[in-house]
Image (cartoon, rainbow, N blue to C red):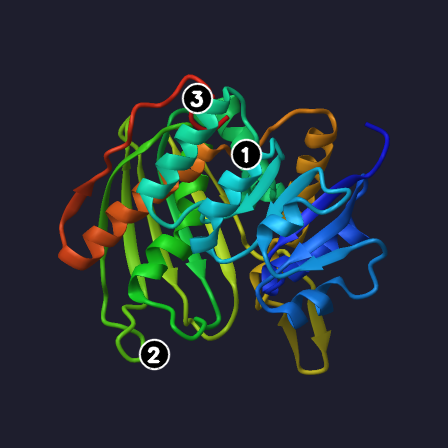
Amino acid sequence: MTELLGVAVLGAGHMGADHIRRLDRVISGARVAAVADPDAERAKEAAAGLAGVTVHAEPEAALDAPGVSAVLIASPGPAHEEALLAAFARGLPVLCEKPMVPDSAGALRIVQAEVRLGRRLAQIGFMRRYDAEYRRLKALLDEGSLGRPLMLHCTHRNVSSPPGFTSAMLVNSSVSHEIDAARWLLGQELTAVTVLRPVPSTGAPEGLADPQFVLFETERGALVDVEVFVNCGFGYQVRCEAVCEAGSARIGDEHTMVVTTRGGAREEVAQDYLVRFADAYDREVQAWVDATRRGEVTGPSVWDGYAASVVAEAGVRALEHGGRVAVDLAPRPELYAEVGR
């Protein structure tokens, strides 16, 4: 393929607008061909200044727009299933932001729909797999010089939670990234979840169980713990330490600019995921565009999206009812590669 890949972007909110900017200004080999959002003014604003872009209120109208040969879904999670199925019906390659589908039943329907096609069309937006530090940690674990991984210690902190954020969303929205990262880093499925709740922070909105401590078990006996704290008040922090039989490795220690002035020094702390993972998003979208132009589909699959949904649902049950909750995955179809690849 020599011509630019024409992409329809579904959703023009915070994430969608950033992807539109990325496709227009950062990524090579692609252009924004159509934008769809129920808020027509927001869609027009996101597409302003882009040549040859059509703007739509309905997703399917954008998929059928002239010049569209691929789809980037950045709309709210409840709209993803319908958009994915519409893309599949048209044979359009898709990059879909997480969550692929909020509930595991819907996620399984997406898996089954792609299996019926007999080929992969969708990549799911677990962008940490494209972060330079995470990729170095993955390569080190795969190399095996540190021995068998025994534990992952993870931290996920946000400055503040958006309006309407619920206790369940700490697991099924925030920790969903750690769910996928753990499966990918270890090459193992997660088999059980336990959620512990300390006394809520005084900085958390009333009724929000924040922070939480989430413990995952894996199929080969490793443990993964996640501290998730979405109203820490001071910065966006993501860390991961792998503890293995012969050593450990840690990422996410904010190797950022340190400003020194008279009387002291100040280290910058990212305030937003779009800042901390800007490079990862760039790498992710560029890899998707490059693969699509080659006629290939790489990266996290719809099975990965389904597995994350099932594990997150088990985590929410553990949060709400207490105790250890087992993860019950459907049989893995042959279409999908082994865990973590």
Q: Is residue 156 above or below residue 332?
A: below
Q: Is residue 177 above or below residue 271?
A: above
Which residue is at a point 56% across and 60% down the rendered structure image? 273
What kind of residue is marked 2? Pro
Do the numbered discs 3 and 2 sit on residues whose CB atoms are within 8 Å?
A: no
Mark 3: secondary structure: loop
The residue wearing badge 2 is 205
- Residue 247 visible in the displayed image: no
Is residue 39 rendered to the left or right of residue 105?
Answer: right
The residue wearing badge 3 is 338
Picture disc at residue 13? none
The image quarter containing residue 135 is: top right
Q: Quadrant of the N terminus?
A: top right
Mark 1: secondary structure: helix
Q: CA distance from mark 3 to mark 1?
A: 26 Å
- x then y, percent, for residue 56: 66, 59
Mark 2: secondary structure: loop
Which residue is at a point 38% across and 40% down the rendered structure image? 107
Q: Of the residues under marks 2 and 1, which one precedes in the sequence?
A: 1
- Crowdedness near tag 3: few (<14), some (14–19) or many (≥20) residues, C-alpha within 10 Å: few
Q: Of the residues under marks 3 and 2, which one precedes in the sequence?
A: 2
- Residue 93 visible in the displayed image: yes
Is residue 294 rendered to the left or right of residue 57?
Answer: right
Q: Is residue 143 above or below residue 191?
A: above
What kind of residue is marked 3? Glu
The residue wearing badge 1 is 89
Which residue is at a point 45% across and 23% down the rendered structure image? 116
- x then y, percent, for residue 24: 79, 53
- Crowdedness near tag 1: few (<14), some (14–19) or many (≥20) residues, C-alpha within 10 Å: few
Question: Which mark is nearer the camera, 3 or 1?
Answer: 1
- x then y, percent, for residue 204: 35, 76
Q: How many marks?
A: 3
